[in-house]
Image (cartoon, rainbow, N blue to C red):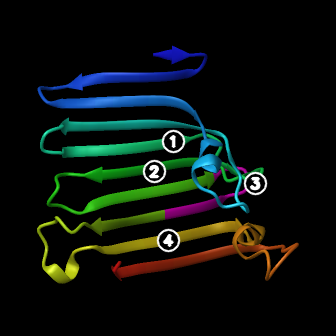
């Protein structure tokens, strides 16, 4: 299916798999789905999903790509997110990067989530292990979330944060 630059493509993979591609998704749709006034998303996104075996959810992967991810008119740069699941008993692996080449700003999140169905000890289930790395991120972006506390901020943020533990 296609309309202008938008495309929806469904393909068969091997015997029981499938690939789905959706291109040029208008990111402003997030504004309708997620009601959070301080954030206004824009840009376009390409979505890719493939799974080797639909019946067993084996080797599933989602990839999101945007050449210009924008929040409140600020260009966060290129976005790429990869989310993968080898099978239902394994952790979900995720990677997200937003890179603005002109300014050097970069935000990277890498992590894994161990779902309740995973073959892990009970104390590890429903837990997250993630690392966040931020370089040259404009401080004004914090105003999206804490505008009651700060305004007209200047400067850049560099940070490395690690998150781990149960989510319940």
Q: Which of marks 2 and 4 is nearer the N terminus?
A: 2
* Label 2: element kind: strand
Q: Earlier in the sequence, mark 2 or mark 3?
A: 3
Mark 1–mark 4 Cα distance, whole angstroms, equals 19 Å
Image location of residue 117, percent across then percent down: 17, 64
Q: In this view, does 91 lie above or below 65?
A: below
Q: Name the residue under label 1.
A: 65
Q: Is residue 63 left or right of residue 88?
A: right
Q: In this view, does 89 lie to the left or right of 42?
A: left
Q: Residue at x 15, y 80 (%)?
A: 122
- Which region shows up in magenta? 100-108
Q: Is residue 37 left or right of residue 114?
A: right
Cβ–Cβ below 8 Å for labels 1 and 2?
yes
Mark 3–mark 1 Cα distance, whole angstroms, equals 19 Å
Cβ–Cβ below 8 Å for labels 3 and 4?
no
Q: Earlier in the sequence, mark 1 or mark 2?
A: 1
Q: Mark 4 points at which residue?
A: 132
Position of the C terminus, as image quadrant, is: bottom left
Binning the other alpha carbons within 10 Å of mark 2 as few (below 14), some (14 to 19) or many (20 upward) gives some
Q: Residue at x 35, y 38 (%)?
A: 49
Q: Mark 3 points at which residue?
A: 72
* Label 1: element kind: strand
Q: Residue 26 carries which label?
A: none
Cβ–Cβ below 8 Å for labels 3 and 1?
no
Binning the other alpha carbons within 10 Å of mark 4 as few (below 14), some (14 to 19) or many (20 upward) gives some
Q: In this view, does 84 lie to the left or right of 17?
A: right
* Label 3: element kind: loop
Q: Which mark is residue 81?
A: 2
Mark 3 or mark 4: which is in front?
3
Position of the N terminus, as image quadrant, is: top left
Q: Earlier in the sequence, mark 3 or mark 1?
A: 1
């Amino acid at each position: 299916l296609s309309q202008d630059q938008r495309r929806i493509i469904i393909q068969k993979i091997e015997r029981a798999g499938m690939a789905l591609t959706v291109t040029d998704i208008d990111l402003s749709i997030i504004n309708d789905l997620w009601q959070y006034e301080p954030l206004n998303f824009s840009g376009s996104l390409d979505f890719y999903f493939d799974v080797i075996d639909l019946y067993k959810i084996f080797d599933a992967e989602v990839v999101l790509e945007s050449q210009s991810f924008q929040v409140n008119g600020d260009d966060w740069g290129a976005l790429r997110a990869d989310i993968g699941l080898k099978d239902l008993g394994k952790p979900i692996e995720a990677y997200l990067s937003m890179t603005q080449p002109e300014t050097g700003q970069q935000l990277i999140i890498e992590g894994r989530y161990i779902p309740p169905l995973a073959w892990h000890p009970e104390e590890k289930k429903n837990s997250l292990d993630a690392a966040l790395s931020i370089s040259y991120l404009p401080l004004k972006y914090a105003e999206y979330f804490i505008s009651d506390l700060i305004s007209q901020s200047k400067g850049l943020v560099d940070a490395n944060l690690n998150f781990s533990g149960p989510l319940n």
